[in-house]
Image (cartoon, rainbow, N blue to C red):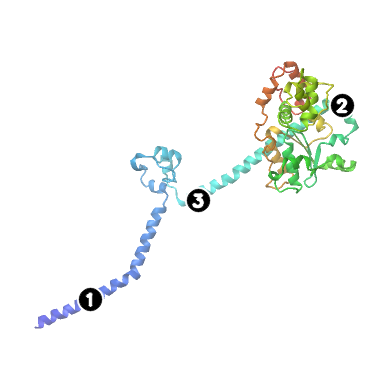
């Protein structure tokens, strides 16, 4: 009996202990289990975020294994280099340990290189273009000194500055050379003056017929002299034969209500044998050979036009000491350099669109060669002589080897 009571007591005691253990176990999730799960989650997150190179370096001979022997894509292995993907094995040089501090340093260095590299290239470009400008201006002065005429002693007249446009806000003088980007240059001047927000919104008619820009000859003598002395004087030109062909294609091969009757009719009448009545009436269909005959004729049936007049006559570079001489062949780079130098708005860049006959190819050296192949050697030589000073003063090479 006593033994039974003891067992009962022990049973009661053990039961109490089991009850207390159960109660304690129920309380664990609120403390111990929470800490255990949080620690486990943190460990998994650390392993997930660890750089593959740090994992692989623990086993120097480890390989990158992908299913079915296929090479991974960038999405599958964003840390892999292209060479790594092709080899599917991390190169030995990349197996060295890369710590987080290393990655931060590499990232900082890469960002600095991305920032410094464009600045360095820009400075090199500016230095190169500055030297080009110095060389062009020096050549212009040397040629002018060698071929100086008596008319230079008489000084600058209104006629000499009649092709120069004025932009007073940024103190810029631009000499217009047709077929050398002049339409887009006028757009730029209009934006600089605040007459438009962007060059893209200005139509061709507004550029040439809107009278939005002032010419230098519209000022009095003191105004002309002051601007010539203090403003930045700019000239942009083009390879002479290429400019000539561009003008011919634009004015005579496309519909034109002015050049066909004013120039086409007298050219056909004088230089075409057995011309049809329709051609004589409309002036359409002038050939390039007929156009060159007109250009070289000292007794032209109709006068000269600015679209094919030599630059030395249009802009008088021996009378006006231009500060910037740009070329159509590199017009965007050089024009944008000039715009930055005069303090133009940062969002204003030189436009590259072609608004007249946009579907026609730009006149290139190949197209120019094609047109001049229609002429004989004498005609080519005389045309070269006509533009000789432009070729010499602005350092353009002879367009044909058989010219002298």
Q: Are marks 1 and 3 in contact (CB under 8 Å)?
A: no
Front: mark 2 or 1 = 2
Residue that mark 2 sits on = 149
Q: Which residue bears the numbered disc 3?
A: 104
Residue at coordinates 77% horizontally, 46% vertically from top-left? Answer: 170
Query: Looking at the rendering, which quadrant does residue 227 occupy?
Result: top right
- Measured along the vertical axis of the image, is residue 269 above or below residue 76? above
Residue 351 location in percent, x, y? Answer: 68, 40
Residue pictured at 89% horizontal, 42% vertical: 220
Q: Is residue 249 above or below residue 168?
A: above
Compute the Cα span from label 1 to label 3. Answer: 57 Å
* Quarter of the image with the C terminus in it: top right
Residue 325, placed above or below residue 289:
below
Picture disc at residue 17: 1
Give whichever of discs 3 and 2 has the lower sequence position: 3
| Nearer to us in this view, 303 or 188 | 303
């Amino acid at each position: 009996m006593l033994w039974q009571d003891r067992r009962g007591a022990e049973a009661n005691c053990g039961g109490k202990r089991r009850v207390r253990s159960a109660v304690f176990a129920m309380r664990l999730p609120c403390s111990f289990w929470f800490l255990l799960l949080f620690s486990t989650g943190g460990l998994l997150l650390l392993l997930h975020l660890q750089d593959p190179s740090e994992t692989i370096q623990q086993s120097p001979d480890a390989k990158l294994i992908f299913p079915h022997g296929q090479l991974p894509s960038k999405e599958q292995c964003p840390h892999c280099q292209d060479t790594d993907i092709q080899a599917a094995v991390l190169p030995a040089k990349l197996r060295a340990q890369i710590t987080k501090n290393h990655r931060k340093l590499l990232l900082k260095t890469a960002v600095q290189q991305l920032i410094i590299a464009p600045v360095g290239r820009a400075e090199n470009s500016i230095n190169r273009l500055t030297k080009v400008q110095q060389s062009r201006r020096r050549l212009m002065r040397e040629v002018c000194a060698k071929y100086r005429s008596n008319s230079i002693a008489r000084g600058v007249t209104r006629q000499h500055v009649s092709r120069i446009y004025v932009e007073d806000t940024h103190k810029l003088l631009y000499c217009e050379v047709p077929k050398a980007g002049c339409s887009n240059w006028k757009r730029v001047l209009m934006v600089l003056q605040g007459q438009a927000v962007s060059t893209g919104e200005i139509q061709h008619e507004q550029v040439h017929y809107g009278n939005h820009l002032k010419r230098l000859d519209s000022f009095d003598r003191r105004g002309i002299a002051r601007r010539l002395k203090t403003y930045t004087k700019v000239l942009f030109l083009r390879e002479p034969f290429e400019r000539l062909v561009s003008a011919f294609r634009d004015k005579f091969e496309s519909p034109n209500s002015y050049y066909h009757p004013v120039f086409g009719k007298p050219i056909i009448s004088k230089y075409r044998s057995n011309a049809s009545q329709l051609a004589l009436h409309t002036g359409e269909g002038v050939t390039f050979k007929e156009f060159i005959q007109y250009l070289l004729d000292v007794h032209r049936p109709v006068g000269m036009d600015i679209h094919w007049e030599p630059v030395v006559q249009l802009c008088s570079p021996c009378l006006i000491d231009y500060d910037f001489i740009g070329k159509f062949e590199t017009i965007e780079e050089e024009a944008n350099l000039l715009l930055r130098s005069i303090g133009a708005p940062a969002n204003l860049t030189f436009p590259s669109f072609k608004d007249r006959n946009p579907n026609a190819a730009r006149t290139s050296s190949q197209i120019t060669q094609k047109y001049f192949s229609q002429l004989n050697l004498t005609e080519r030589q005389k045309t070269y002589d006509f533009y000789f000073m432009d070729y010499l003063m602005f350092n353009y090479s002879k367009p044909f080897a058989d010219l002298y």
